[in-house]
Image (cartoon, rainbow, N blue to C red):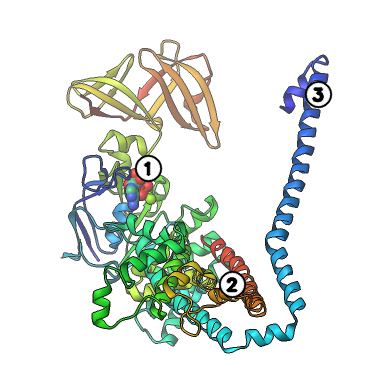
Amino acid sequence: MSIRVEHLKKRFGDFSTGSAGSAADFVAVDDVSFEVESGSLVALLGPSGSGKSTILRILAGLEAPDEGRVLFDGVDATHVHARARAIGFVFQHYALFRHLTVEENVAFGLDVRNVPKATSRRRANELLDLVGLGGLGGRYPSQLSGGQRQRVALARALAPEPKLLLLDEPFGAVDAKVREELREWLRRLHDEVGVTSIFVTHDQDEAFSVSDRVLVIHRGRLEQLGTPSEILDEPRTEFVAGFVGEVNVFPAEVANGEARVGALHAKVGAPDGHARLVVRSYDVKLWREDAGIATVERVVTLGDRVRVHALVDGAGSLVAQFPRRSSLLKNVEPGCRVQVEVTSARAYPRA
Amino acid sequence: MRAERDVGAPAIAPVEAAKLDARDTRGDRLAAGRVALGAVVVLYLAVVLLGPMGALVAEVSRIGIGEVLSAVLAPPALEALGMSIALVAISVVVNAFVGTIGAIALVRHRFVGRGLLGALADLPLAVSPVMIGLAFLLLVGREGVLAPVLEALDWKIVYAFPGLVIGTLFVTLPYTMRELAYVLEEIGTSEEEAAATLGASAWQTFWHVTFPNVRVALGYGLLMTAARALGEFGAVLVLGGSISGQTQTATTFIHDAVEERALAGGYGMALVLGAISVVLLALLEHLKHRRARALGRTK
Ligand SMILES: Nc1ncnc2c1ncn2[C@@H]1O[C@H](COP(=O)(O)OP(=O)(O)O)[C@@H](O)[C@H]1O
Ligand SMILES: [Mg+2]
């Protein structure tokens, strides 16, 4: 199913006055529009509180937008009840039915549609096999681990064959190792089942490693929509640039396609004037040179990466990252002078 | 704290030790205080609960089991007990519906006057049943505002069974509703939302998701309702008038019996009510544990 969202807006009333629609309202989703192609896997990425869950809940029909429309396959679904949207929703904290067995949980969406019991049980068990939980159908949710509950929630959402699968931080509540596995597995499952899927995450690695496209959300607004590499290579706003990697930000002056701050300069594609220069830590080269423009403060080894913290004349501190065996690192040690070259940078105009 | 002591100079050590001593004796005093408090609670329970029950049993055996039994099994006593049981049954059934619907409305829906409804639902807890009875008398009594209407319709409320029902329903209103509202708040909406996304109708969601989760709480609330209905005195006295064989309940029967010095009947009935209360309490205790377990499985 293809999805089209037009100018979505959602306010939440101020609890202290209890009145909705007043000026004190909090805008959780602010004029968000986007499209999702049928069959793709899309990530809604943003920091906590940016409005990701609210957008997902509006798509599910669990929340009504104040303004804007939601279209499924070109048909306006803004006022269609959640139960009639043919969606599957995986909740952040599973929301399994605690008084039903795993099998009954998975069969729920079929049972409420009066699918014959034999059929619904067979389908439930097929799905449990698919998510690797075959044989656990008789247990209660309280008897499962977090990762297992998550997979039951997924099987339950898939059982009625939804046209759209929505997942709210599906791996947020399981530990790091399980999360990695589930991530891989979600991608494979998506390719197998082929259902259009949108998942919410605040973890950039998760968004980039799993999805076809990423929507970056910040303060209720859509900052950028693109493929993972588009977002990594061409962050459209300063927020996106800072959110998707370790960056250095300097107040700079741009003239003739070159940004300058102190002794540092970089080629950028921004108009002349005041700007904020954003430089990724891995887009910096530096090497020992007594006539250089910076002094090394610290050298930190983190696994297979080395981070160099340097103080650039007239610009301030800068962090650069290198592979551990990089030849550039030769003789680079705290206190020494280094030359700095910015290989790639972006500048965002500033008032 | 520990680090301080470890590095502390010897000169300071005695002071530290004295402080520690002080803390220890304070701990002792706390422990002693807990024991004393425990003793007070036990004593209080003994005086308030076991004392009267014991006195009752002693009194009944002094009068003679035979005489007490025949007084309790006599028609007026049985009719009064039957009346009380009927009121219990009615209030349990009515509260099962009103309490459930009211609690869902209060917790799950947003509407104008919701706060007011919540406060009204708690009102019977704060107001004396006698006062409530009097207020109803002013409304539907012989001289009441609605008296002409009731007369025209030939409805008798006060000093009749409907009066007893109204009084009992009013005083029992909060118990089931509050209990259910608390549990509904506690379990949250995510399972209900999950059911909706899976295609369940409102009724299917209630019946297959919400209700199983609040079943124990409903039982708990209804038991409290039953206990309250059984024990109600003021409202049923004012609205019913305790007419033997018509509007006399178990509690007003006891009152009248003691008044008329028919002690065998009075004490006998008190013992019967006491026994029923013990059973209700035991059931409540049982459900309390089940409820705790059910809520423990929340996430
Ligand atoms: N039901 C609600 N009532 C009031 N405020 C809400 C409600 N739901 C979300 N919000 C607020 O809206 C903002 C966005 O929330 P959410 O969509 O949950 O963010 P995210 O999922 O990105 O962490 C937050 O500031 C949150 O406090
Ligand atoms: Mg969220």
Dot 3 amino acid type: Ala
Is disc 2 placed on a helix, strand or loop? Answer: helix
Percent position of residue A319, x then y: 43, 26
The answer to whether A184 appears left or right of B270 in the picture is left
- Tag 2 residue: B259
Q: CA distance from mark 2 to mark 1?
A: 74 Å
Circle 3 sits on which residue?
Answer: B18
Query: In the displayed structure, would residue A70 be above or below residue A245?
Result: below
Q: Which residue lies at the image location 67% right of the left edge and 79% below the top edge?
A: B264
Q: Is residue B16 above or below residue A198?
A: above
Q: Nearer the viewer, residue A36 or A59?
A: A59
Amino acid under label 1? Pro
* Label number found at residue A131: none
Look at label 2 and name its amino acid.
Answer: Glu
Q: In x, y percent, where is residue A166? A: 34, 61
Which numbered tag is attached to residue A47?
1
Please tell me whether residue A37 is drawn above or below residue A253 in the rendered image. Answer: below
Label 1's element?
Answer: loop
